[in-house]
Amino acid sequence: MMGVVKSAIGDMLMTFSWVVLSATFGIQTSAIISAGDFQGITWAPLVILTSLIFVYVSIFTVIFGSASFNPTGSAAFYVAGIPGDTLFSLAIRLPAQAAGAAGGALAIMEFIPEKYKHMIGGPSLQVDVHTGAIAETILSFGITFAVLLIVLRGPRRLLAKTFLLALATISFVVAGSKYTGPAMNPAIAFGWAYMYSSHNTWDHIYVYWISSFVGALSAALLFRSIFPPPRPQKKKQKKA
């Protein structure tokens, strides 16, 4: 029980920190472009953002270890047959992640200087709700399958894994920017929706929770069918 509680606290702190930090990615990217005189270079924002994600994910991995800030990710690894979580532990960890995200969104909007507030925000629906749900399902499916493939079947070196994760993340973010933001993470979507009191609306639940989980768990089932988890070996009983 104490192990589950520690995991939940780690998830909550990690999600809180990630929401606060990721909210400033736009500000950091703009500052780097200005400092490096990269204005007018079309690829500069994507390269800088990918680099930021790579650096911060590497740091978070060192600080928080096996903690997670994505409920669909935690559930997907469980469905894929990866040891670690149970339904009970997920039931404790997922609300902790959502609480951490809400706290992070409230904190950054409270303490960020007024002149930067227009650059701060989370995922928002850019299309009709059904199109958004389809988009979020596809995006969550894609990023989840990519994460499972990279983490479990990718390169052994941690830095190589982290770089591929950053590359996959930015690719799907760009692909979904005109549809749902995108989120591909119900906790982060919840945090910003809570900030604007839209966390309990049907549109939010349908697009950012139901669709995200459908996409992520479908990816986990496909991954499990392609790469079945090893069956636990039965212990041989010693003859008397």
Image (tube, helix red, strand yellow):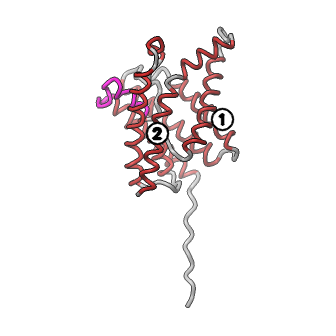
Q: Residue at x 39, y 27 (%)?
A: 106
Q: Is residue 86 above or below residue 14?
A: below
Q: Quadrant of residue 151?
A: top right
The N terminus appears in which quarter of the rendering?
bottom left
Q: Nearer the viewer, residue 202 or 74?
A: 74
Q: Is residue 195 magenta?
A: yes
Tell me which label, 2 or 1, sits earlier in the chain. 2
Q: Quadrant of residue 57?
A: top right
Front disc: 2 or 1: 2
Q: Which residues are magenta?
A: 188-203
The C terminus appears in which quarter of the rendering?
bottom right
Q: Element at badge 2?
A: helix
CA gap between label 2 and label 1 equals: 23 Å
Q: Amino acid at mark 1?
A: Phe
Q: Residue 132: x percent and y percent?
A: 41, 26
Q: Which residue is mark 1?
A: 163
View extreme (top): residue: 40
Q: Is residue 96 above or below residue 234?
A: above
Q: Which residue is mark 2?
A: 13
